[in-house]
Image (cartoon, helix red, strand yellow):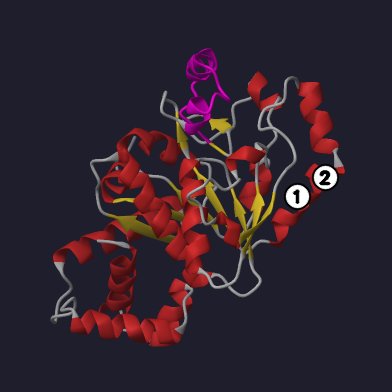
Amino acid sequence: MNYEESLMVKAAWYYYFENMTQQAIADRLSISRMRVIKLLETARQTGLIQFRLRSDGVGMIEQSRDLMQKYHLKDVFLIPESEDEAQLNESIARAGAMYVADRLGDNACINVGYGDTLSRTLNHLATMVQNPVTCISLTGGVSNYLPNTRSHIFNARLYLMPAPLLASSPEMAAAMRAESSVSEIIRMADLSSFTLVGIGAMDESATIVKSGMLSHNDLFYLRMNHAVGDVLCHFLDREGQLLATPLEDRLISTPLSRLKAMQNVVGLAAGVRKAEAIRAVLRGGYLDVLITDEPTAALLLRDG
């Protein structure tokens, strides 16, 4: 089930099973009433509605609702399982871009975090909107936000922190954070209507490790200090608490306290290897919306 089908299932569920009006559904899903009407019509034409909701649609709705209740989320979108990790990241990125594109108003800004999935999301989003998207970086590391030869990010206005992700020393990091060119970008983030963040796992395939930002020794050190994952390169324990490590003092990134205060924070992450990290971010209360896959959702609903 792709993003469009997931949205159709939700609209059909609310309309036929919970007797919500089309306008109430539009308000719940943050889309237009006309979009709801089209989704319901498509649901009828394609046979999704046949006096009962297809069983896979019911399961997805129930998983989404259970996740929203367990972790106090405003919304959850699930995509099907994928055996290929690259394809899974691409599917999550596409779903994230579609989710935001459906809800992004004219002249709106979005905040974007660090990571491979976020770069893919921004690329997809730039192809879906008519006007250039204004994007504000939440971390240092300028090269991670710039377009590549196959990218459509040229259809985006980028406001980037002119700083590395990790400074050479705590003193250098403090000096960079105090620079007006960096603090201005941080202040701009308060103007955004959406914030998109990825979630990293503590393994060798993590973007921050593959990019060379963290060494294998750094990874080992963080694991020994009970880190289970990161958001915006802030490393968390299994309860979602920030770990006070020397790396944190060198980091140029939006503080977690500011992230927690932002509106419409959307987390994009999936895969069994990331489940523990996603659970920690959810326990920390940093997200309003989660976009993930069904197997990961099942793991997040278990006690762990």
Visible residue check, residue 303: yes
Q: Which residues are magenta?
A: 207-230
| Residue appearing at x 64%, y 55% in the figure | 262
Nearer to us in this view, 67 or 248: 248
Specify few, some or many for label 1: CA neighbours under 10 Å numbering under 14, 14-19, or 20 or more.
Answer: some
Counting from the top left corner in percent of width and height, residue 268 is at: 45, 49
Task: Give 119 or 226, whichever is nearer the viewer.
Answer: 119
Determine the secondary structure under disc 1.
Answer: helix
In the image, is residue 211 above or below residue 151? above
Q: Residue at x 39, y 59 (%)?
A: 95
Q: Is residue 57 left or right of residue 172?
A: left
The x, y position of residue 208, in whole percent, is 52, 30
Q: How many marks?
A: 2
Question: Disc 1 residue type?
Answer: Ile
Q: Hey, what amino acid is under mark 2?
A: Ser
The residue where tag 1 is placed is 185
Q: CA distance from mark 2 to mark 1?
A: 7 Å
Residue identified by numbered label 2 = 181
In this rendering, is residue 48 above or below 249?
below
- Say what secondary structure mark 2 lies in: helix
Answer whether residue 159 is magenta in the image. no
**Residue in the image at 41% along x and 28% along y:** 205
Tell me, yes or no, whether the two marked residues, 2 and 1, touch with CB atoms within 8 Å: yes
Residue 300 showing in the rendered view: no
From the viewer's perspective, is 59 left or right of 114? left
